[in-house]
Each structure stands twice: as C-alpha cells, then as structure tokens.
Amino acid sequence: MQRLKEGSPGAATALSPREHAAASRANVERLFAEENPVALFLDIDGTLLDVALTPSTVHVPSVLPSILDALAARLSGALAIITGRQLEEADRLLQPSKFVGAGVHGAQMRLSAHGRIEHLTPSFDASLIADIHDIVDALPGVVFEDKGSGIALHYRLAPELEQPLHLMLEDLVAKHRNEFMICGGRKVVEILPVGFSKGRALRKLASLPQFANRTPVMVGDDVSDVDAFRAAENLSGFGLKVAGENFSPEESSFQGPAEVLDWLQSLSSPRSR
Ligand SMILES: [Mg+2]
C-alpha cells in the first residue's frame, strides 16, 4: 500500500487541506492495521460528544465508555483525554471509565488512569473573581463556570455578547498580563494561567512510559486543539480535525462526533480493519 503521507509535518505542505485531512486519517488507520504502536489523545466536547447549549446538558452515548476502555486496552493504556473541562467532569461523563488525562487545557493532569488529579496552578485570587463576576452581571446570558484552575464564560445562550465579552475580558486580563491569558473556544472564553495549553499537555502526557515510543494522534474540534495537533505532528504524529463550528468539512478528517465514535469503535477491535 502506498503511503499517503510520511510522518514529517513538512511532507504535508504540498497537500491541500482536504488531502491532508484524508491522508492523516488514512495513515492512522494504516498504523492500527499494521499493529504499529499508536497513542491516542482525545478531546471531549465536539469530538466525542455533540456540543450542547450548556456544558452540563451534553448527551453521552451509552456505548462511549466501553469503546474507550476497549481502545485503551488495545493500546496498552496509551489513551488520554485532553479537554477544557475539569477531569472530575470528564470522569462523570465517561463513568464508570477513567483515563489518563489533562483537564482545563492542561492546568489539571492525571498521569495514570486511576491516579490522583493534580492541580498545577494556584486558585484565582478573590478580587479577580469578583471583577469577572461584575462582567458576567453586566452581560445577562453569559454563564460563569469556575473550573478551579481556570474560569470559563459561556455565551452560547447570548451569542450577540461575544464581542463585548471579549473586550471586557481583554481589559481585565491586561491588568494581570503576566499571570493570566484569554483562550477562545466555541461559544466560550476562558481565563487561564499563562503557559498552559493542550499542546503542552500532550507533550507531557506523550513522555509518560505508556505513551512514549508511540505515534501520537490528537483528535479535536476546537481552536484550542490546534496547539495539540502541532505538538503531535512535531512528534511525527497526526492531528485529526473534527468538523463543526471551527473547522470546515473540507479541512476535517471527521464530519462530527458520530463519525469519530464509529471510527474509534472500528479501531478498538484488532481484526476489524
Ligand atoms: Mg472540543
């Protein structure tokens, strides 16, 4: 079988976005088919689950935890969740399964599936939280979520507030330039400690013994996942985009979470491909 794309990111530059998306997915499928070692890194919202009006109202397909368990077993534990959610939330959604993972864009880490969740940053100080609450109070419809290591402001219920929300947060964060940064996402703005990203989280997880010496594959749907795609590609791996509010169907390897789920299910059984 002819290789569609070699592992180096440079080889992809001649491909159109559509060709790149198809080739990346085909290469990952080939790695599985040939029993080559792969490490999977999965975003949750918009990747494994359809996006809901608010984060708490997502629907979790009943088969999802067992598919991920089977895949993790096939990969000898080299399956991790990399999400903007808190890992406690990820556990609740994926119960009874638990996985290695990074939460709040890497500000939380769990280095073994049943290990302790480490919070890598101090909590926000009270005055900054009060200032953020003032912004939320001024913009009815914006939903405040305290993630411990970060704060998310969701505006899916009031999309017209995107611009004023961004402007007010930029003013606020400018006063804390060396401590906090703004991270945009789908209908959400997050205030995070500087220095954390899904890319950094992927690099850290990829260095763990059960992930090392495997081809890293990141699957995600949001702008915050781009950094993790790049991290995977820099480790001679692949970033697979899921179409949705951020990535077009043409540039994506999957058209939505249902297709990702089918794909993961097919990969979870060694002889299915
Ligand atoms: Mg997502």
Image: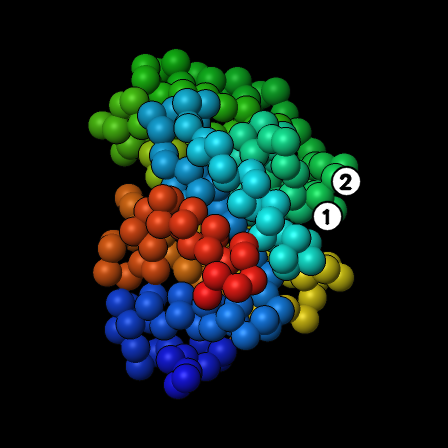
Please tell me which residue lies in front, 64 or 151.
64
Disc assigned to residue 268: none
What residue is disc 2 on?
115
Q: From this viewpoint, is residue 34 visible?
A: yes
Position of residue 201 measured from the top left corner of the image (x, y, whole percent): 61, 52
Q: Note whether ligand 1 is within 8 Å of mark 2.
A: no
Disc 2 from disc 1: Cα separation = 7 Å
Q: Amino acid at mark 1?
A: Leu
Q: Residue under label 1, please give it.
A: 111
Residues 217 and 129: in front is 217
**Image quarter hosting the N terminus:** bottom left
* Rendered location of residue 14, percent (x, y): 31, 81
Quarter holding residue 103: top right
Q: Is residue 51 left or right of residue 215?
A: left
Most extreme residue toward the front is: 271
Residue at image position (41%, 79%) is: 5
10 Å crowding of disc 1: few (<14), some (14-19), many (20+): some
Above-or-below relation of 187 to 244: above
The residue lying at 41 percent from left, 60 percent from top is 240
Q: Residue at x 59, y 73 (%)?
A: 36
Q: Residue at x 56, y 38 (%)?
A: 65
| Labels 2 & 1 near each other (Cβ < 8 A) | yes
